[in-house]
Image (spheres, grey):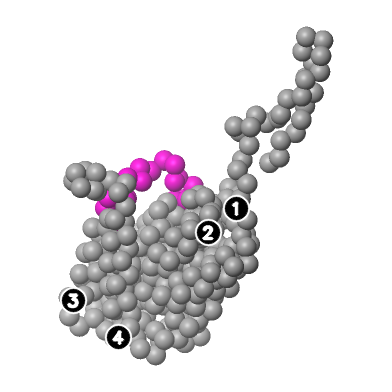
């Protein structure tokens, strides 16, 4: 928004007043050079590769955009745009490999998208401090589960919940979390698929990517209305995400749980460490650290 000069008559003279006032003018978005765009493309490619296997791509893309000079709100909104390409690319790759049936999983995907849209719309109403404090603990628990739980492979196990109940309860709940906060969403979907639906690691990864893609769509729709998306950076990163996710999903389909399980543990621990390293993390404040 650019200021307009308005003539105001006062004491018989014409004075120029800047409108809107200078303190209300929106800051201009930073200039993204070709060099910065190239670095963001590379970061998105690596993030897409890792995220398509174990999640945690935001650990790479969010800091990269912040270092490029994007404001925090723009970074979060743009991250949803570029991650659409990665999760969508991985979903297509896993579907082509026969590891997820898009049509039969569409009801779950819709529930995930609706939950995420609701979460994104309520970001100002839910206390973020509680989520930031609990998330590192939950991620460490997930990492320990996949690290020490025996017999977690690519073969399906006993199902503890019907797909219908799973789809109308946990799926929109995790989607809501993705819309309102985001980090660790893939890990939560993975844990739910493995422990409750009895999926093997590769099948759980494929279905996680589809529901993550749907939740990204729901949250992106809300962020797009807000106008906080940096389209140039987001689309360039989207290309990197798409290509990286293709490469990562192909590796996952070749190696299965041998690559998915250790990368999932590393991603959970890395994200938990990043959150706990933040001096502003509420958990550190509560514990006096």
Q: Are marks 4 and 2 in contact (CB under 8 Å)?
A: no
* Closer to viewer: mark 3 or mark 2: 2
Identified at 60% across, 56% down, the residue is 230
| Front of the two marks 4 and 1 | 1
Q: Tell me the residue that label 4 is attached to.
A: 258
Read off the residue under disc 2.
68
Q: Is any part of residue 101 visible from this angle?
A: no
Nearer to me, 179 or 118: 179
Q: Is residue 180 above or below residue 23?
A: below
Q: Does 178 lie within the magenta span?
A: no
Instruction: Report the disc number at residue 63.
Output: none
> Pointer 2 and pointer 1: residues touching (CB < 8 Å)?
yes
* In-front residue for pair 114/73: 73
- Disc ID at residue 149: 3
Give the Cα separation between the discs numbered 4 and 1. Answer: 42 Å
Q: Which mark is residue 30?
A: 1
Q: Position of residue 11 (x, y in %)?
A: 78, 9
* Span of residues in magenta: 118-135
Classify mark 3: helix, strand or loop. loop
Can residue 42 be seen here? Answer: yes
Q: Residues within 10 Å of mark 1 (few under 14, many from 20)?
A: few
Which quadrant would residue 184 be assigned to in this image? Answer: bottom left
CA separation in Å, label 4 and label 2: 35 Å
Q: Return the disc, 1 or 3, that comes first in the chain's sequence.
A: 1
**Residue 3 locus on image (x, y percent):** 71, 35
Residue at (54, 79) in percent of width and height: 243
User: Badge 4, how many Cα within 10 Å: few under 14, some, many 20+?
Assistant: some
Q: Earlier in the sequence, mark 3 or mark 4?
A: 3
Count the numbered circles shown: 4
Q: Nearer the viewer, residue 212 or 159?
A: 212
């Amino acid at each position: 928004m650019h200021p307009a000069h308005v003539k105001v008559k006062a004491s018989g003279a014409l004075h120029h007043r800047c409108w809107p006032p200078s303190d209300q003018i929106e800051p201009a978005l930073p200039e993204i050079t070709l060099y910065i765009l190239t670095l963001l493309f590379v970061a998105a490619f690596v993030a897409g590769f890792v995220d398509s296997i174990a999640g945690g791509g935001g650990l790479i893309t969010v800091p990269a955009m912040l270092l490029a000079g994007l404001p925090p709100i723009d970074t979060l909104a743009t991250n949803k745009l570029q991650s659409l390409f990665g999760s969508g690319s991985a979903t297509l790759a896993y579907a082509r490999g026969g590891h997820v049936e898009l049509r039969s999983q569409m009801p779950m995907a819709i529930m995930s998208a609706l939950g995420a849209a609701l979460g994104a719309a309520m970001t100002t109403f839910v206390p973020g401090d509680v989520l930031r404090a609990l998330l590192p603990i939950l991620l460490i628990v997930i990492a320990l589960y996949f690290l020490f739980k025996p017999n977690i492979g690519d073969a399906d196990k006993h199902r503890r919940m019907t797909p219908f109940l799973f789809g109308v309860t946990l799926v929109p709940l995790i989607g809501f979390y993705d819309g309102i906060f985001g980090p660790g969403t893939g890990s939560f979907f993975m844990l739910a698929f493995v422990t409750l639906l009895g999926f093997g690691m590769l099948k759980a990864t494929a279905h996680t990517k589809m529901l993550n893609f749907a939740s990204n769509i729901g949250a992106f729709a809300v962020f797009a209305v807000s106008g906080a998306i940096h389209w140039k950076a987001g689309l360039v990163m989207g290309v990197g995400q798409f290509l990286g996710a293709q490469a990562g999903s192909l590796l996952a389909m070749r190696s299965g749980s041998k690559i998915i399980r250790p990368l999932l543990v590393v991603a959970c621990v890395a994200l938990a460490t990043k959150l706990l390293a933040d001096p502003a993390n509420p958990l550190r404040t509560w514990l006096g650290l």
